[in-house]
Image: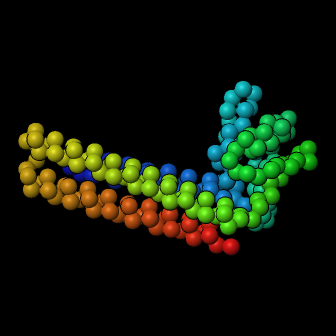
Amino acid sequence: MQDELMTKTEDKMKKTLSVLREEYMAIRAGRANPQLLNRIMVDYYGTPTPLNQMANISAPDPKTLTIALWDTSQLKAVEKAIMASELGIHPSNDGKVIRLVVPELTEERRKELSKTVKQKAEEAKVAIRNTRRDAVEQVKKQKKDGLITEDDQKQDEEKIQKLTDKYVKEVDAVAAEKEKEIMKV
């Protein structure tokens, strides 16, 4: 029973960390990365569709992304979706391929992105702490219901706290790495 609780708790914390990593991939750090476009949804015949399911996205050089659509009739819709996104990149197309030139980040923009990184890290830490709180409540309930002893309760709470500390440290490490990437000129 307790192993199941610990496994569920750790799984939730891992998921939080993986969501944070995905969010960080969408933050551009001054170089072209196809994952920048992962969150862009295009109105494809009335259905919101992820751009990466409609096209081949590549980075032929560190400053350029190319989007080769499988259905070239959707060029305008894709351009519109990119313009509406928070990327801040203006697309250009030659009738077949859309090109995105990723501009250098200004010092001001780097600081804004750095704040965003810190904010997302803090949100992840809150989610991890909420997971800890839920697990501790379950342990207390099990003690109250007589399913575990007081010693078991203390041990489980310590294990949960160690898991929490481990994942909070990982969040800090991932955030520091992304911040370093953003601030690198």
Q: Position of residue 49 (x, y in %)?
A: 68, 36
Q: Residue furthest top?
A: 46
Indicate the quadrant where residue 46 lies: top right
On screen, residue 159 versus residue 65, left or right, reads left
Q: Is residue 184 above or below residue 103?
A: below
The foreground one among 29 and 32 is: 29
How many numbered callouts? 0
Q: Which residue is located at x 67 percent, y 33 percent?
A: 48
Q: Which residue is located at x 21 percent, y 43 percent?
A: 138
Q: Residue furthest bottom?
A: 185
On screen, residue 97 versus residue 179, left or right, reads right
Q: Is residue 120 visible?
A: yes
On screen, residue 10 versus residue 50, left or right, reads left
Q: Which residue is located at x 27 percent, y 62 percent?
A: 162
Indicate the quadrant where residue 158 lies: bottom left
Q: Which residue is located at x 32 percent, y 62 percent?
A: 165
Q: Position of residue 172 (x, y in %)?
A: 44, 65
Q: Is residue 166 above or below residue 132?
A: below
Q: Residue furthest right?
A: 94
Q: Is residue 78 visible?
A: no
Indicate the quadrant where residue 122 lies: bottom left
The foreground one among 3 and 44 is: 44
Asked which colour scheme the image uses, the reply is rainbow
* Quadrant of the image containing the C terminus: bottom right
Q: Position of residue 13 (x, y in %)?
A: 38, 53
Q: Position of residue 12 (x, y in %)?
A: 38, 49
The foreground one among 91 and 75 is: 91
